[in-house]
């Protein structure tokens, strides 16, 4: 039997590395496409191609001979120049699509985000039929929505594809959510209601869903063009989760609270100051972050269960144990603390 050639964009990143490791365990021939070279990928036996998503020639060359692409790489965050998000998330995704079509790649699994449909209101038990909002408060969700539309359009041109929307990925080696909470732990305040629920997903579960999507697409091409929410299927208080991350790092819980309105106005003010002074680092809070913090976000994943056979193999409790063990082994120095 022919060994499948698989490429992961951002294979050295948080989610990409776990997908890559699981693909190796399944005896796939795996290549990572990233701007950096990662010694840990070499140790796993992963081939590495260094290149830039923003360079179409780099992407086309890297995709030669590939059967399946997992497009995980993206520019994330709550703040930054719009063009920097557009060049990676939109133009980069267009280059991925063009490279797939040019090289006859059979399948594309695209990593998106539920933030693409965030309309600033509570979202409770919503499914994939929810439309995109007319406006966005930040370039990340806006450009990721544009990327989704490109992938859907590519499916109409013959590229078999599935889009996944994992919500708040966390776990050992997290380079976004957990370190952000740990760094700001002493300054964090509860924003808005304390009992708002949100979806999260442990990184291994997110990786499993990506691989399930590729396997199901191979046997059932009719799934092409579908979008799926994926999560722990266990909505929790975002503040309870934040405190659990702090506890895993040996830090005290969040103290103090501000209203949703106060947080939003503070975000607006910081955005104005940072834009005026052209400050590139993240503000303490933005309007987008304030709205997300003060609203519920949990989704119906029955479509992923039915079509992909997805179910979270690792519980929140087990995931937190693994996170704590990793933090104890590495120390918060991993996050520059």
Image (cartoon, rainbow, N blue to C red):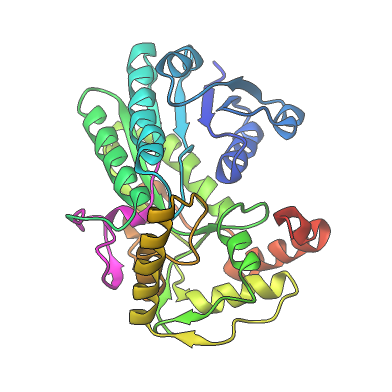
Residue 255: image quadrant is: bottom right
Q: Residue at position x 69%, y 31% from top?
A: 38
> Image quadrant of residue 231?
bottom left
Q: Nearer the viewer, residue 263 or 126?
A: 263
Residue drawn where x is 58% and y is 68% of the image: 316
Residue 312 position, x and y percent, is: 51, 59
In the image, what residue occupies the spot 37% across and 49% down?
Answer: 140
User: Quarter of the image containing the C terminus?
Assistant: bottom right
Image coords of residue 169 (percent x, y): 52, 56
Q: Main secondary structure of the magenta part?
A: loop
- Residue 333 in sight: yes
Residue toward you, 299 or 180: 180
Taking the image as shown, residue 123 lies to the left or right of residue 22, namely: left
x then y, percent, for residue 335: 70, 56
Mark yes or no: residue 292 visible: no
Residue closer to the observer: 220 or 319: 319
Residue at the outermost right position: 329
Magenta segment boundaries in residue numbering: 111-133
Please check the rendered image and state whether residue 110 is part of the magenta-colored stretch, yes or no. Answer: no
Q: Is 119 included in the stretch rendered in magenta?
A: yes
């Amino acid at each position: 039997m022919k060994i499948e050639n698989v490429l992961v964009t951002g294979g050295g990143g948080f989610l990409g590395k776990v997908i890559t490791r699981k693909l190796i365990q399944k005896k796939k021939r795996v290549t990572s496409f990233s701007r950096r070279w990662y010694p840990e990928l070499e140790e796993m036996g992963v081939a590495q191609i260094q290149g830039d998503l923003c360079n179409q020639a780099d992407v086309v060359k890297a995709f030669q001979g590939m059967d399946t692409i997992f497009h995980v790489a993206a520019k994330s965050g709550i703040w930054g120049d719009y063009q920097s998000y557009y060049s990676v998330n939109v133009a980069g995704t267009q280059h991925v699509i063009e490279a797939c079509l040019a090289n006859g790649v059979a399948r594309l699994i695209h990593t998106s985000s539920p933030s693409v449909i965030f309309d600033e209101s509570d979202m409770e038990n919503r499914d994939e039929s929810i439309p995109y909002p007319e406006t966005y408060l930040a370039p990340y969700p806006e450009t990721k929505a544009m990327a989704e539309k490109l992938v859907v359009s590519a499916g109409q041109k013959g590229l078999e594809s599935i889009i996944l929307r994992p919500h708040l990925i966390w776990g050992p080696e997290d380079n976004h959510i957990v370190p952000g909470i740990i760094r700001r732990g002493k300054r964090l305040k509860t924003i808005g209601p304390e009992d708002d629920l949100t979806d999260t997903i442990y990184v291994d579960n997110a990786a499993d869903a990506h691989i399930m999507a590729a396997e199901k697409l191979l046997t059932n091409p009719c799934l092409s063009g579908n979008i799926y929410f994926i999560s722990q299927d266990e909505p929790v208080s975002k503040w309870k989760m934040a405190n659990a991350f702090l506890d895993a790092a040996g830090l005290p819980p969040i103290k103090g609270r501000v209203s949703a309105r106060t947080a939003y106005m503070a975000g607006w003010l910081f955005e104005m100051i940072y834009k005026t002074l052209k400050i590139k680092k993240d503000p303490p809070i933005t309007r987008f972050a304030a709205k997300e913090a003060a609203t519920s976000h949990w989704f119906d994943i029955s479509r992923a269960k039915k079509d992909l056979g997805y179910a979270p193999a690792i519980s929140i409790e087990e995931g937190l144990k693994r996170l704590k063990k990793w933090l104890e082994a590495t120390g918060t120095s991993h996050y520059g603390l």
